[in-house]
Amino acid sequence: MMHMTFYWSREVTILVNSWHAKTWLSYSLSLLACLLASIFYQYLENRRMRLKLIAAGSVKGKPSPSATTDEPLLQKTGGGGGKVRWSAARVGEAALFGINSGIGYLLMLVVMSFNGGVFLAVVLGLSIGYLLFRSEDQNSTILENPCACA
């Protein structure tokens, strides 16, 4: 029977068999890579949130002149034709969401190596990234999800 518990060792395999740290140097570089990837995740999430605000027509919580119209982001053209037109900001937001979801799920799998140092590096990176890029988000009405893979 296999038990899933955290362990503290410099020997760890992260994501793929070829990423196997055995020495203190390779372990330290792996932790640094996990830290930076977590910070980058928060940076991209900040960019996505800003793009969402732009798509909604407001930046820093103030509506722009173009946001005074009540047009939805997805508009049907031609009455009953059923064709849908998306704005560039909406498509960009969707692309960033997809990329960030992929990074989030990879970070989740990294943590599932059950190495204590890797876990701490990811959580510390997410915290640093949040402090640097997201702690002053302009729109407080956007619900935040603490899960890195959401």
Image: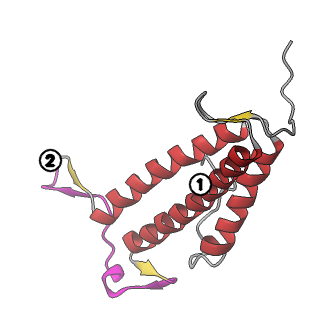
Judge by depth and name the residue closer to the eye, 2 or 71. Answer: 2
**Left or right, 14 with reference to 94:** right
The local secondary structure at tag 1 comes to: helix
Quadrant assignment, res 42: bottom right
State the residue position of label 1: 37
Report the label total.
2
Judge by depth and name the residue closer to the eye, 20 or 51. Answer: 20
Seen at 58% across and 30% down, the residue is 18
State the residue position of label 2: 81
Q: Is residue 65 found inside the magenta-colored segment of the image?
A: yes
**Left or right, 99 with reference to 9:** left
What's the residue type where badge 2 is placed?
Gly
Decide: is 46 above or below 99.
Answer: below
Seen at 75% across and 59% down, the residue is 124
The local secondary structure at tag 2 comes to: loop
Residue 20 percent coordinates (x, y): 66, 33
User: In which quadrant is the N terminus drawn?
Assistant: top right
Residue at the top extreme, as displayed: 1
Residue 57 percent coordinates (x, y): 38, 77
What's the residue type where badge 1 is placed?
Ala
Residue 38 percent coordinates (x, y): 63, 56
Q: Is residue 131 found inside the magenta-colored segment of the image?
A: no
Q: Which residues are magenta?
A: 60-80
Judge by depth and name the residue closer to the eye, 97 or 19. Answer: 19
